[in-house]
Image (cartoon, grey):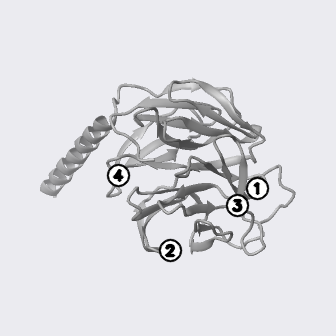
Amino acid sequence: MIALKKIFTCLFLLFTVHSLFAQQVLYDTLTKPRLISRQFSFTEGASVDKKGNVFFTDQPNNKIWEYSADGKLSVFMDSAGRSNGMYFDKKGNLVTCADEHNQLWAISPKGKIRVLLTDYQGKLMNGPNDIWIDAKGGIYMTDPYYQRPYWSRTKPDIEGQKVYYLPKGKKQPIIVDDQFKQPNGIVGTPDGKCLYVADIADNKTYKYAINKNGTLSNRQLFAAQGCDGMTLDMQGNVYMAGKGVTIYNPQGVKIGHIAIDEPWTSNLCFGGVNKDVLFITASTAIYTLKMNVKGVE
């Protein structure tokens, strides 16, 4: 029994040392995230363009903001459809979950709006929350139901909270998984082979294989943790927003945690000219942290 205890103690110490080393490789653990601004009601939807400029939403105030690669903060759009999660397509359009009327929008660099999705089989979506766009231009979307004070309805039109795929150029999405309590964060690998989806209400995150037609297969539990937004670095590590930022390696092993002194961390992405600055939306504020790795968006 004593020998077994020693073995388990040694294994635990080895795991702890490995995790600390892995975390230090990613960023300087002695450096705290830098507060950029606290002038918002609730920040969300961090997404980066090709130049490294980061766009994010202040959803209660119905605005999309830009934090440029050279550190300037400005309003990109007023009356932004109560946008939530966002992602840039290959043409530089900012695709947003326009929560006000449960739609998907594509916003051009000049601010021109094109509505991509209005309904599913004639019924309002629950409330598109987060998206990831594949190399073909197809959009994966989580559709949980969070009752909003600006909605006239008080219950969903669609039964269940699901994940959808909207093929490029199509008006109707397809359901790719309906086995969730409340799907939220979503992100895919740059090779287009894997998709991660967080079930925030069930405190779990799943990993899928992406099939050629956009459907999903081989659902596997990736981590016993749900989250809000997610992003990836070039090493394949998964960054999950929630209570701070939790980092998992590609095998689903927790290797780090970045504490954020805010009630909630909602979303994140890698920005800056070199895509090596972690940009974090957290409650009424935004933060950055210089990293030793780059993002893949």
Identify the mark at residue 282; answer none if there is no mark: none
**In the picture provided, is 176 more to the left or to the right than 193?**
right
What residue is disc 3 on? 145
Q: Residues within 10 Å of mark 2 (few under 14, many from 20)?
A: some
Instruction: Answer few, some or many: residues within 10 Å of disc 4's Cα (few below 14, many 20 plus, some between 14 and 19).
Output: some
Q: Type of residue at label 4?
A: Gly
Disc 2, disc 3: CB below 8 Å? no
What amino acid type is highlighted by mark number 1? Gln
Does any portion of residue 140 appear in the rendered image? yes
Quadrant position of the N terminus in the picture: bottom left
State the separation of the CA atoms marked 3 and 4: 30 Å
Q: For mark 1, what is the residue?
A: 147
Sequence-earlier tag: 2 or 1? 1
CA gap between label 2 and label 3 equals 22 Å
Identify the residue at horizontal 53%, vertical 30% (top origin): 287
Mark 3–mark 1 Cα distance, whole angstroms, equals 6 Å
